[in-house]
Image (spheres, rainbow, N blue to C red):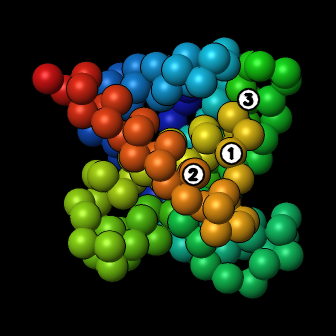
Amino acid sequence: MISFHYETQFELPNEAQIEQWIGNVIASENRKEGEINYIFCDDEYLHKLNVEFLNHDTLTDIISFDNSLGNQLHGDIFISVERVADNANDFKVSFEEELRRVMIHGILHYCGYKDKTDEDQAEMTAKENEKLQMFHVEQS
């Protein structure tokens, strides 16, 4: 089950559509959907988590805590809406597109994709692009 929680004024306008898309992405990676919580927050909230749990004193757009069991994905994905907005501006894409990219980035980590090396980052970006296209297909 995919759940959305809000620690800021932001709310997804299309939760059902996003939930279906994420479920389809999970299935496309031959994984099963478990309990996945998305928590939308601001920079301050996510920065505190970054310092407390990862010992990183920096701003970030996403932190995902993976509690997957075998092929079944479980976890909590925290997303700073402020960071996503700034990144969308920097990358010259819409807020919605950047938000979807970040949301699926967390799922891809649960599926085993990494992003620490240049090679891993290239693979992650390619997978993100592939999964973003799945959202657009559902729109038609």
Which residue bears the numbered disc 2? 124
Whether 109 is drawn above or below 10: the answer is above
Q: Earlier in the sequence, mark 1 or mark 2?
A: 1
Please name the residue shown 57% across and 51% down the image. 124
Where is residue 75 shown, x and y percent of the image? 73, 36
Q: Is residue 103 visible?
A: no
Q: Nearer the viewer, mark 3 or mark 2?
A: 2
- Residue ID at (24%, 26%): 137
**What is the CA distance from the residue labelled 3 to the residue labelled 2?**
19 Å
Q: Residue furthest front?
A: 119
Give percent across and percent down for residue 62: 59, 59
Q: Quadrant of the N terminus?
A: top right
Question: Could you classify mark 1 by the number of other residues whose Cα lies within 10 Å: few (under 14), some (14-19), or many (20 or more)?
Answer: some
Specify the label residue 74 is tagged with: 3
The dot on residue 136 is none
Do the residues under discs 3 and 2 have CB atoms within 8 angstroms? no
Labels 3 and 1: the sequence-earlier one: 3
What residue type is disc 1 on? Tyr
SS at mark 2 in the image: helix
Label 1 close to label 2 by CB (< 8 Å): yes
Judge depth for marks 3 and 1 and give the one in front: 1
Tell me the residue that label 1 is attached to.
113
Looking at marks 3 and 2 on the same chain, the residue that comes earlier in the sequence is marked by 3
What amino acid is found at the position of numbered circle 2 in the picture? Answer: Met
User: Would you say 41 lies left or right of 53 here?
Assistant: left
Residue 19 located left or right of residue 65:
left
Tell me where residue 15 sits by quadrant.
Answer: top left
Left or right of 34, for residue 67: right
